[in-house]
Image (cartoon, coloured by chain):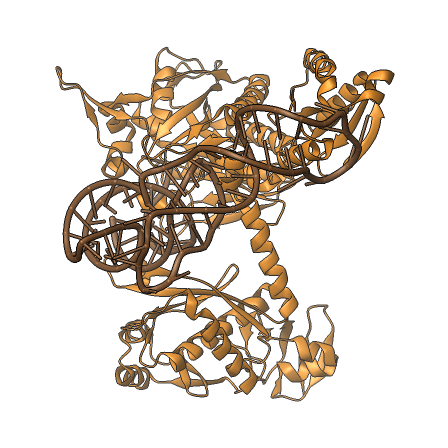
Chain colours: A orange, B brown
Amino acid sequence: MINITLPDGSVRQYESGVTSLDVAKSISEGLARNVLAAKVNGKVTELYRPINEDATVQLLTWNDEDGKHTFWHTSAHLLAAAIEELYPGVKFGIGPSIETGFYYDIDFMDYQVSSEDFPKIEKKMQELVKAKTPITRREVTKAEALDFFTQKGDEYKLELISALEDGTISFYESGKFTDLCRGPHLVDFSPIKAVKLINLAGAYWRGDEHRKQLTRVYAVSFPKKSELDEYLVLLEEAKKRDHRKIGKELGLYMFSETVGKGLPIWLPKGTDLRLRLQNYLTKIQKQYGYQQVITPHIGSKQLYETSGHWDHYGADSFQPITTPEEGEVYLLKPMNCPHHCMIYKNEPHSYKDLPLRYAEFGTVYRYEQSGELHGLTRVRSFTQDDAHIFCRPDQVKEEFIKVMDIIQTIFKALSFENFEAQISLRDPENKTKYVGSDEVWEKAERAIIEACEEKNLPAKVEYGEAAFYGPKLDFMVKDAIGRRWQLGTIQVDYNLPERFQLEYINKDNQKERPVMIHRAPFGSMERFVAVLIEHTGGKFPLWLTPDQFIILPVSEKYIDQAKEMHSKLEQMGLRGVIDERSEKIGRKIRDAELKRIPYMIIMGEKEIGEGTLSIRRQGEGDLGSMTPEQFVDRVNTEIENVL
RNA sequence: GCCGAUGUAACUCAGUUGGUAGAGUAGCUGAUUUGUAAUCAGCCUGUCGGGGGUUCGAGUCCCUUCAUCGGCUCCA
């Protein structure tokens, strides 16, 4: 008999050779029906594998990440099996599970495949699911494996196998389909009740642009049809919130082929919103001791040679600008930090002056590959809400905490309730690729970790993700429909102070290097506004939205009174517009709802007689009547609750 | 940059086998004077992304170029 320890700590006895599926059956029938794979001693394995000694066993279902990924990985095999039947002779690359779903990279040879073929492939997949053919694992020798795929003529698999060590190679077979795979997999395809092919895309073999481009088929699958339907609804919802669509509808920004691709143009409403965001952040930063600066949009090439950016990124940047007479060479500003370093260098500093915090809404220009441009999130000109903190090494932690305070304050004001942080540290295996001494790195890394602990911020530590010049902390927010976006960032930098020979005079009258901290709570105004649009679906927080109210006169007779009320409300600090059209009230309400204006004010005979306003809240409906003063109070209270 | 798809009115889209461009919305004009998500009527709207070609004739077929979209690669 052997002892099996379950996640709740209970221990059960089984005969040696018991399988995880047996264990599941012994616990409950429902669990046995839903279990997909098992984690035995921390390793995910198939349900049919015998367990021969004492072990800890966690039974994995759809609700476990590992269970889900096993499910999707097997689904990728199902996809490949279906495609091999429909398109004999195609060659397969890799087919992993991803965050949502899975893909398979396929060389379709001479077949022409398009999304019109999806239903056919989905149907074939369903047939294979119904066949309930078991999926079996077979360990093979390297020679055997090479031989199999040589016969099949699949050079991609051969390449994968040749990188593997003999004795570690396994095949998974289901009916006619055999694939090289480490596993683990489901017992058969039958739990895969719903599949949906999402799209086709080109993908280089092994991500190398010099190698052949395969066709990547993206798909998702679920154990229940209803879950697929829910997922499709979510996709629809994401589509509705697309900032490119809403940005156009609300007249926030535009692009022009004539101006150039990737160069966003902020329209009046969008500018209004952006400036409000900027003013808000400026006000907070002032409270935290920041000083606002303004620097030019270009800088001499030499500046960027000194900073190292030219060496690192020059080749991929916009080409330098040369003056015709003198031959001076300038670059469009790709980064604000070198300019800020020069501000620091403009005068000598004492340790008593530090930290110095220079902030700038600095517009930068970066050449992004044309295929990479995307709405406002990936552009060639954008404005960073940038600031650089120059501090002593012993101030790093304190400064981090202050920046985190700022970020948390603005996330709250913008109704990002869910966020987490990622701490990026050095690769402990390879410390040579980083600048700065061991000592300062360790100190800064510790400072970041401690700062997160003190702020009670859930943070994930990633080793090897730090920039070569310092560790960093990135903020990820979860939006209203559960998607994750990376926003703000805080980065420690030992490199630039060195390169620019920045110094301060310490207590002992010795010259010392300051530490530099780069930070941008929004990241870029463009990207942030895009995320904000997708998060709110265009229903911006009341303090931020371009128009807070719209007055809807019941008929044209009341326009004069509407105008009076409009200027009264504006004098009381609100902002809004009047719908003066000769339309019925129902129509005006509908249009205001679609424009996502938070408050609709209906004014007709009744209101004018009583000196009240009938208020309607966007998305909620009629709130009844109140005096103008009560209305302004209500708006102000609502704003105070978030700011 | 690479692979694939798309590009028709301000917006969303239709346009058969090649026969000379249409609907809704928006806009304008007029009527209506409206009570909590679409009042009615009339009018206007186009280099069919740009350039070249095939053809008696091209929105439609071919080439080329640009932009957008989905990915890949990249991302200070």
Above or below, comparing residue A410 to residue A632 in the picture: below
Instruction: Give the quadrant of the N terminus of chain A.
Output: bottom right
Which quadrant of the figure has residue A516?
top left
Q: Is residue A192 visible?
A: yes
Q: Residue at x 44, y 78 (%)?
A: A82
- Residue A215 at x, y = what percent? 35, 65
Q: Is residue A40 visible?
A: no
Q: Residue furthest right?
A: A610
- Residue A468 at x, y = what percent? 36, 40
Q: Is residue A530 or residue A321 the one in the foreground?
A: A530
- Residue A55 at x, y = what percent? 62, 77
Above or below, comparing residue A456 to residue A576 in the picture: below
Above or below, comparing residue B18 to residue A595 in the picture: below
Instruction: Give the quadrant of the C terminus of chain A.
Output: top right
Q: Is residue B22 or residue A31 the one in the foreground?
A: B22
Q: Residue at x 84, y 29 (%)?
A: A624
